[in-house]
Image (spheres, grey):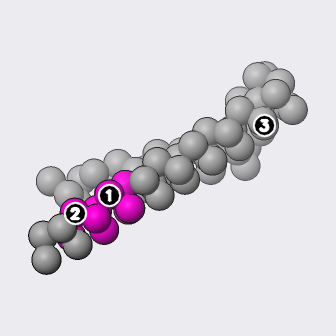
């Protein structure tokens, strides 16, 4: 039973890290494509980044 729970946690953690790497890659490609000035001024991208940070902080808050 304990091994199965640990295995599920390891899979979940690996998938979460993989998803974060994809998001980081996407943001890096947008910076390269738009340039840093346009990336910061592009309102939809700024909203996405802020929303992602808010959700991440909310998840951390619920855990504690």
Q: Which residue is mark 1?
A: 10
- At horizontal 76% and vertical 22% (from top left) the residue drawn is 36
Residue 44 in view here = yes
Q: Where is residue 9 drawn, in percent x and y?
A: 28, 62
Residue 41 in view here = no
**Earlier-in-chain disc, 3 versus 2:** 2
Range covered by the magenta-colored residues: 5-13
Nearest to viewer (mark 3 / mark 1): 1
Q: Is residue 11 above or below residue 39?
A: below
The numbered dot on residue 6 is 2
Element type at mark 2: helix
Task: Please check the rendered image and state whether residue 12 is part of the magenta-colored stretch, yes or no.
Answer: yes
Say few, some or many: other residues with alpha carbon within 10 Å of mark 2 (under 14 / 14 to 19 / 20 or more). Answer: few
Q: Residue furthest bottom?
A: 1
Task: Please check the rendered image and state whether residue 31 is part of the magenta-colored stretch, yes or no.
Answer: no
> Of 54 and 24, which appears nearest the observer?
24
Q: Where is residue 25 drawn, in percent x and y?
A: 67, 39
**Earlier-in-chain disc, 3 versus 1:** 1
């Amino acid at each position: 039973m304990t091994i199965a729970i640990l295995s599920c946690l390891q899979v979940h953690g690996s998938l979460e890290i993989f998803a974060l790497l994809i998001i980081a890659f996407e943001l890096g490609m947008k910076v390269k494509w738009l340039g840093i000035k346009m990336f910061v001024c592009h309102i939809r991208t700024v909203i996405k980044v802020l929303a992602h940070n808010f959700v991440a902080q909310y998840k951390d808050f619920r855990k504690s």
